[in-house]
């Protein structure tokens, strides 16, 4: 992170405060003359990487409440620009802070217009910042930070008084909203002078606010005074509660600790505390022009790119570390697998050594095993095939067998005299033998002799039942009805006595 530096500007010159975390270190002071400007320019040339913020503690300020019709986008920006030009024509350092919409009428938007009315006070310092091309985050006014010093149970209307390097700062708040601010210079800044000025200026502010009808004359004004412990006794002596003023004196050191500033340099004013508040919680609105913040924009872009690059680099390193650890794990697993493989190979070799020696070559042993497997398959014989046929015959009790021949074959001989049943396995898919083959002559009941279509359907259903068993082929040799176009169909009257329809087929099953 870059070094954060707050430039506290007052009529006497520019004071430098280096802010980091919960500590603020006071640096050089540059008087508002040519020698101070030159020293400041020389300082910037040696610290051009710092991030600067300008905090103005000057009396030349303007505050104005204005209600505008509710709008957005370019229309709202144009209205605000016109209003700022009307009230603060002679300065470019102006801004508008929205305080929300009114609850009555047409619900206009209420704006607080603020400006630094003497730009010549800032111009010499801004010129040196621009020449040094340093990053200027923004320009702020000290009253913008004063709301952070209010108590949580602050009254609806409250006057905050705090000593600053430029004098005595008085800021009036209405329901925690900034309304106006004044600055009273102090000659010495001693405890007695500060106490007298606090009591006097509080009375003047009450008269002014009452005259402007910003407060009720009949109600006392709550005055919160932030002072160094060395000034508290003098303030309590001078600042007595009256019918119009009610003082609440707060210890500056205790307030600094509450707001997160752990170290204070012992100065009687609250300049260091305001610098801490500016860095801790910067207001959303600021006075600097876009041209004056261009180097800050470049710094933001550069910082973003560096951050993204660092994240990418960190991600790459994490990914590389993960790959490295995964590689180590894989290498460990490979070593364990290799060791287990060696142990398995040793056990395998030991098992082979323990086996009795067989006077056979590997090829002869392989051929012997193949023949043994083939003989094992042949050993089951015709049993499974006959069982399959028997189960189908039980489902078709009207079909009778006339003749059955069986064979065990190593190789099938395919002829054109037979036709494979469409629903069975093909011969080519059976592979190599051995095979069990049944040649069967069967007949249908005599009752179907005159119903040729019923004969064909019954035989096809029988063949379909046989073909459901895997590795089974049904080859049709003869159907009960010869439907070839060259054969003359004869009726039962022409053939005389009805005969049982006959058919023949072959059933082949792989063992």
Image (cartoon, helix red, strand yellow):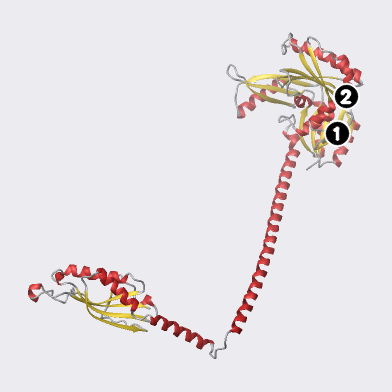
Residue 277: image location, x then y, percent:
78, 31
Q: Residue at x 73, y 45 (%)?
A: 302
Figure quadrant of residue 344: bottom right
Residue 380: image location, x then y, percent:
38, 80
In terms of depth relative to the viewer, which is nearer, 4 or 314? 314
Residue 90: image location, x then y, percent:
75, 23
Q: Is residue 422 visible?
A: no
Q: Is residue 510 above or below residue 70?
A: below
In terms of depth relative to the viewer, which is nearer, 334 or 169? 334
Total label count? 2
Q: Quadrant of the N terminus?
A: top right
Label 2 sits on a secondary structure element that is: helix
Label 1 sits on a secondary structure element that is: loop
Q: CA distance from mark 1 to mark 2?
A: 15 Å
Tell me whether the residue at label 1 lies in contact with that at label 2, contact meaning CB atoms closer than 8 angstroms: no
Q: Is residue 356 above or below residue 485?
A: below
Q: Is residue 219 above or below residue 123?
A: above
Question: Mark 1, residues whose alpha carbon is within 10 Å: few (<14), some, or many (≥20)?
Answer: some
Figure quadrant of residue 122: top right
Residue 495 left/right relative to 297: left
In terms of depth relative to the viewer, which is nearer, 203 or 301? 203
Residue 405 left/right relative to 375: left
**Residue indicated by mark 2:** 229
Q: Is residue 160 above or below residue 284?
A: above
State the mark number for residue 450. none
Q: Residue at x 66, y 69 (%)?
A: 336
Question: Mark 2, residues whose alpha carbon is within 10 Å: few (<14), some, or many (≥20)?
Answer: some
Q: Residue at x 9, y 76 (%)?
A: 495
Q: Is residue 409 visible?
A: yes
Residue 366: image location, x then y, percent:
50, 85
Residue 467 left/right relative to 231: left
**Residue indicated by mark 1:** 263
């Amino acid at each position: 992170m870059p070094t954060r530096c707050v430039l506290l500007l007052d009529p006497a010159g520019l004071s430098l405060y280096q802010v980091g975390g919960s500590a603020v270190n006071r640096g050089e002071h540059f008087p508002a003359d040519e020698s101070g400007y030159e020293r400041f320019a020389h300082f910037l040339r040696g610290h051009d990487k710092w991030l600067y913020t300008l905090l103005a503690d000057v009396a030349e300020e303007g505050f104005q409440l204005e209600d505008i019709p509710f709008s957005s986008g370019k229309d709202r920006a144009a209205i605000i620009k016109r209003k700022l030009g009307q009230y603060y024509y002679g300065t470019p350092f102006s801004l508008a802070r929205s305080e929300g919409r009114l609850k009555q009428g047409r619900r206009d938007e209420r704006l607080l217009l603020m400006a630094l009315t003497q730009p010549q006070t800032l111009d010499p310092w801004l010129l040196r910042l621009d020449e040094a091309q340093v990053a200027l985050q923004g320009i702020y006014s000290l009253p913008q930070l004063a709301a952070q010093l209010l108590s949580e149970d602050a009254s609806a209307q409250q006057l905050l008084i705090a000593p600053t390097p430029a004098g005595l700062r008085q800021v009036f708040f209405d329901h925690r909203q900034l309304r106006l601010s004044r600055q009273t210079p102090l000659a010495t800044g001693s405890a007695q002078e500060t106490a007298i000025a606090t009591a006097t200026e509080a009375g003047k502010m009450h008269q002014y606010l009452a005259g402007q009808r910003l407060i009720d004359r009949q109600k006392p004004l709550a005055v919160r005074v932030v002072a160094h412990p060395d000034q508290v006794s003098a303030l309590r002596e001078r600042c007595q509660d009256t019918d119009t003023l009610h003082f609440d004196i707060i210890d500056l050191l205790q307030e600094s600790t509450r707001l997160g500033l752990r170290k204070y340099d012992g100065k009687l004013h609250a300049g260091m505390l305001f610098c801490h508040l500016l860095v801790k919680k910067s207001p959303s609105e600021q006075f600097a022009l876009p041209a004056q913040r261009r180097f800050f924009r470049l710094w933001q872009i550069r910082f973003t790119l560096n951050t993204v690059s660092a994240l990418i680099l960190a991600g790459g390193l994490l990914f590389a570390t993960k790959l490295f650890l995964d590689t180590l794990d894989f290498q460990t697993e490979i070593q364990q697998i290799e060791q287990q493989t060696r142990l398995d190979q040793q056990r395998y070799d030991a098992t082979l050594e323990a086996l009795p020696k067989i006077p056979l070559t590997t090829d002869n042993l392989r051929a012997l095993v193949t023949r043994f497997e083939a003989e094992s398959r042949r050993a089951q014989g015709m049993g499974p095939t006959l069982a399959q046929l028997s189960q189908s015959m039980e489902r078709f009790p009207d079909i009778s067998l006339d003749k059955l021949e069986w064979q065990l074959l190593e190789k099938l001989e395919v002829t054109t005299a037979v036709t494979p049943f469409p629903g069975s396995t093909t011969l080519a898919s059976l592979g190599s033998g051995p095979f069990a083959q049944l040649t069967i002559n069967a007949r249908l009941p005599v009752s179907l002799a005159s119903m040729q279509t019923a004969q064909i359907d019954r035989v096809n259903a029988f063949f379909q039942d046989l073909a459901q068993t895997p590795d089974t082929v049904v080859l049709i040799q003869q159907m009960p009805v010869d439907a070839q176009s060259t054969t003359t169909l004869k009726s039962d009257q022409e053939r005389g006595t009805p005969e049982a329809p006959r058919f023949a087929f072959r059933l082949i099953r792989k063992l």
